[in-house]
Image (cartoon, grey):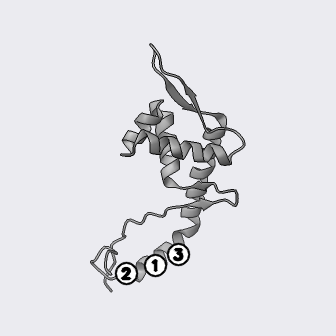
Amino acid sequence: MTRIKPVQVRMKLRLEFANGLLLGPGKAELLEGIRETGSIAAAGRRMKMSYKRAWDLVEAMNRCLREPVVHTSKGGSGGGGASLTATGEAVLAHYRRLEAAATQAAAAEVRALQRLLRAGDGGHGA
């Protein structure tokens, strides 16, 4: 019996709430970028998106949540900045835990699907 080499599988979790909040890998990555860089603009650049797009995503989250996800301070001689609020930290932590739980819960089904893949095409066949 030919042994099939494991294929790297990525699962993307996207949550759509009734109030319009969409939360997925992009917004989670943006929040992490803001936390790590202290800047919405820098976080957006890391993701190859404009400041306006990054700010629009932050504002979309802010509109749907009880409290803002990001605290901003105006520029000046010391420069402006951004940081996650307690709500932003909680949103990110809950999302990452959901991702981990979903990945773990789906592991057996993913393995079953991998066994159905063609040998040698890495799962990229049509």
C-alpha distance separating marks 3 and 2: 13 Å
In the rendered image, the residue lying farthest to the left is 120
In the rendered image, the residue lying farthest to the bottom is 1
In the rendered structure, find residue 105 and report the number of the disc placed on it: none
C-alpha distance separating marks 2 and 1: 7 Å
> How crowded is the residue under tag 3: few (<14 C-alpha within 10 Å), some, or many (20+)?
few
C-alpha distance separating marks 1 and 3: 6 Å
Q: Determine contact: label 2, label 1, CB under 8 Å.
A: yes
Residue 2 placement: quadrant = bottom left
Q: Which residue is the site of mark 2?
A: 117
Q: Position of residue 70 (x, y in %)?
A: 58, 35
Looking at the rendered structure, the secondary structure element under dot 3 is: helix
Looking at the rendered structure, the secondary structure element under dot 2 is: loop
Q: Which residue is the site of mark 3?
A: 109
Q: Position of residue 67 (x, y in %)?
A: 69, 39
Q: Which residue is the site of mark 1?
A: 113
Residue type (three-letter) at the residue carrying disc 1: Leu
Residue type (three-letter) at the residue carrying disc 2: Leu
Query: 83 or 18, which is in the foreground?
Result: 18
Residue type (three-letter) at the residue carrying disc 3: Glu
Q: Position of residue 98 (x, y in %)?
A: 61, 56
Looking at the rendered structure, the secondary structure element under dot 1 is: helix
Q: Determine contact: label 1, label 3, CB under 8 Å.
A: yes
> How crowded is the residue under tag 2: few (<14 C-alpha within 10 Å), some, or many (20+)?
some
